[in-house]
């Protein structure tokens, strides 16, 4: 059985979260608006790739959990403070995060970051950003990507706390572009009917998303996640979840990436 609750970010930081009593084996934190990985559907239900993957893995491994929708920064804070056991929120696995205390599972989806502009914008590449301002979401790989380019291409950065506000800033002209995870941006444009476009050729190499904990004492949760992920990939559940939210083409692409990674590992062994 899985329980889902939503707490305000302030509640986490003031300790109210810690006072919550749950009979579940684990408390998991996640973001609130990161479609199609976690979001609220038309019925008010919390859904998405991360939500479904976690549910399938928990069922496979026989553990229960309480999923708390906190937002990106507050999810990290809750885990670091010991108020949550782990976090699943489309978090890219990077060396920088590992060095700062993140402990990641195996990757479960490879995502690139790219630049998005207004549909009618004349910005065709990074070279058109000189002297202009772009938007990024605080603490994300999109922000890291933009920061790696700003000196070379002469643009400045404005930070936003959530993706919808950032998108509206692009649409309203407060910033000329934004940097976001490519699958998130593509889904938001398509499902939200946003007058935005991803700039062709602007994506980076990307990195896999991973489930994360912030305390070595939680290694058992990482082990269960990895074992469950391997099992649902083997029995087809993983492909069904990816296809449900991203379509059959995305499923095939993911399979190809997995096979390429496996072959690369064999060569290295």
Image (cartoon, rainbow, N blue to C red):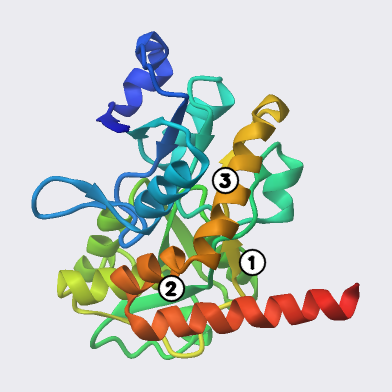
Question: On residue 225, which mark appears?
Answer: 3
Q: CA distance from mark 3 to mark 2?
A: 25 Å
Q: Is residue 221 above or below residue 10?
A: below
Q: Secondary structure at mark 2?
A: helix
What kind of element bears circle 3? helix
Which of labels 1 and 2 is toward the front?
A: 2
For image coordinates 33% across by 49% down, the residue present is 162
Quarter of the figure with the N terminus: top left
Q: Determine the secondary structure under disc 1.
A: helix
Label 1 environment density (alpha carbons within 10 Å; few <14, some 14–19, many ≥20): few
Task: Give the vertical position of 99 relative to 186 (above or below).
Answer: above
- Give the class, few, some or many, for how many residues have Cα within 10 Å of label 3's Cα (few <14, many ≥20): many
Is residue 89 among what the camera can see?
yes
Disc 1/disc 2 C-alpha distance (Å): 17 Å
Q: Is residue 256 above or below residue 150?
A: below
Q: Residue 31's x, y, as percent?
A: 37, 44
241 relative to 46 in the view: left or right: right
Q: Earlier in the sequence, mark 3 or mark 2?
A: 2
Tell me where residue 222 sits by quadrant: top right
Residue behind mark 2: 182
- The part of the image, by quadrant, that contains residue 193 is bottom left
- N-terminal of the pair, mark 1 or mark 3, is 1
Q: Which mark is residue 148?
A: 1
Q: Is residue 29 left or right of residue 153?
A: left
239 above or below 76?
Answer: below
Spatial separation of the CA atoms under disc 1 and disc 3:
32 Å
104 and 256: which is toward the camera? 256
Quadrant that contains the C terminus: bottom right
């Amino acid at each position: 059985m899985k329980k889902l609750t939503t707490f305000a970010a302030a509640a986490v930081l003031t300790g109210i979260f810690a006072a919550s009593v749950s009979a579940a084996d684990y408390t998991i934190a996640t973001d609130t608006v990161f479609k199609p990985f976690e979001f609220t559907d038309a019925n008010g239900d919390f859904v998405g790739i991360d939500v479904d993957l976690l549910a399938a893995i928990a069922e496979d491994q026989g553990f229960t959990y309480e999923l708390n929708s906190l937002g990106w920064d507050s999810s990290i804070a809750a885990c670091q403070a010991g108020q949550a056991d782990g976090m699943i929120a489309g978090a890219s696995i990077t060396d920088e995060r590992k060095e700062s205390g993140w402990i990641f599972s195996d990757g479960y989806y490879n995502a690139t970051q790219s630049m998005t502009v207004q549909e009618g914008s004349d910005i065709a590449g990074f070279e058109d950003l000189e002297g202009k301002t772009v938007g990024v979401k605080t603490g994300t790989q999109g922000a890291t990507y933009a920061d790696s380019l700003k000196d070379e291409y002469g643009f400045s950065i404005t930070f936003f706390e959530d993706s919808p506000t950032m998108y509206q800033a692009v649409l309203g002209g407060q910033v000329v572009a934004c940097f976001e995870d490519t699958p998130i941006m593509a889904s938001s444009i398509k499902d939200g009917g946003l007058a935005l476009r991803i700039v062709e050729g602007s994506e980076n190499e990307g990195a896999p998303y991973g489930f994360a904990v912030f305390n070595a004492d939680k290694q058992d949760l990482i082990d269960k996640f990895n074992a469950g992920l391997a099992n649902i990939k083997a029995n087809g559940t993983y492909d069904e979840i990816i296809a449900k939210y991203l379509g059959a083409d995305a499923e095939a692409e993911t399979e190809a990436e997995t096979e390429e990674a496996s072959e690369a590992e064999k060569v290295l062994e």
